[in-house]
Structure formats: structure tokens, C-alpha cells
Amino acid sequence: MLERTLRREVKEEVGIEINNIEYVTSLATVHKDGGPSLVISCLADYVSGEVKLQPEESDQSVWVNLEEAKKYQLIDGIYDELIMAEKKRKGEKTEWKRF
């Protein structure tokens, strides 16, 4: 169910197709404005398509490696999830923690 929903949402929101979706971890947070969010981190393989953002959803996108991601203001905990994803991609087992 998660995989099907993610595949559909990625296609609708950014215009690309993905497959081989794997769950990594999730992060619940409450933002400074009091708004809650739940980020579910997954790995997936790019299949096809060009990134086309929905203006009401996001105003920019970039493809970056792990080191380059440090330059961006990310939601607290997201960089840690990116490290987990990188470890998973390399076949290493990991649990969420501050890296």
C-alpha cells in the first residue's frame, strides 16, 4: 500500500516514475508554527520522467549528494535520514539516530 501510494504521489507531484521502493524510516515533528508533519523516508530507483514541480507544492528542486545536502536548510532530522538511506543503499543495517 505505501509503495503504491508513494509511486502515485511522486508521479503526480514531480512528474517522475519510480520503482523498487524500500522503506528506510520515518520522522514525526512539530514545526515552529505548531504544524505537525510525518516524513516517511524511502529509497527508490528512478525509472523515467523529468522533474516538473507543482507551484502550489514546492518552488525548487535539486539533485544533490550527501555532502551537498549539508548546504540546505532541512527539516530537523532529515540529514540523519539521508545518512540512513545512504547506508541502506550500501547494504548496511542502521537504526535512526543523530549522526
Image (cartoon, grey):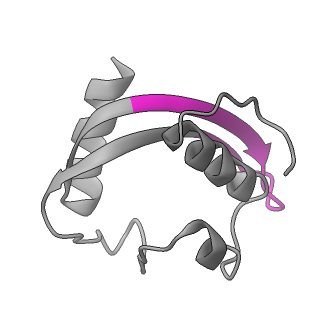
Which is nearer the eye, 29 or 26? 26
Question: Residue at left 84%, top 61%?
Answer: 32
Question: Residue at left 60%, top 78%?
Answer: 68
Question: Residue at left 60%, top 66%?
Answer: 66
Q: Is residue 83 left or right of residue 5?
A: right
Question: Residue at left 29%, top 43%?
Answer: 9
Which is nearer the eye, 93 or 11? 93
- Please tell me whether residue 97 is drawn above or below residue 56 in the rendered image: above
Which is nearer the eye, 46 or 26? 46
Q: Is residue 6 left or right of residue 37?
A: left
Position in image of residue 19 (x %, y %): 23, 37
Q: Which quadrant is home to the N terminus?
A: top left
Whether residue 23 appears in magenta in the rendering, the answer is yes
The image quadrant of residue 20 is top left
What main secondary structure does the magenta stretch of the protein show?
A: strand
Position in image of residue 78 (x %, y %): 69, 54
Q: Is residue 12 left or right of residue 93?
A: left
Position in image of residue 86 (x %, y %): 57, 49
The mark total stands at 0
**Residue range (magenta):** 22-39
Position in image of residue 21 (x %, y %): 35, 32
The image quadrant of residue 57 is bottom left
Which is nearer the eye, 7 or 91? 91
Viewer can see residue 12? yes
- Please tell me whether residue 80 is drawn above or below residue 52 in the rendered image: above
Q: Residue furthest top?
A: 1
Q: Is residue 39 left or right of residue 58?
A: right
Viewer can see residue 41? no
- Please tell me whether residue 52 is drawn above or below residue 47 in the rendered image: below
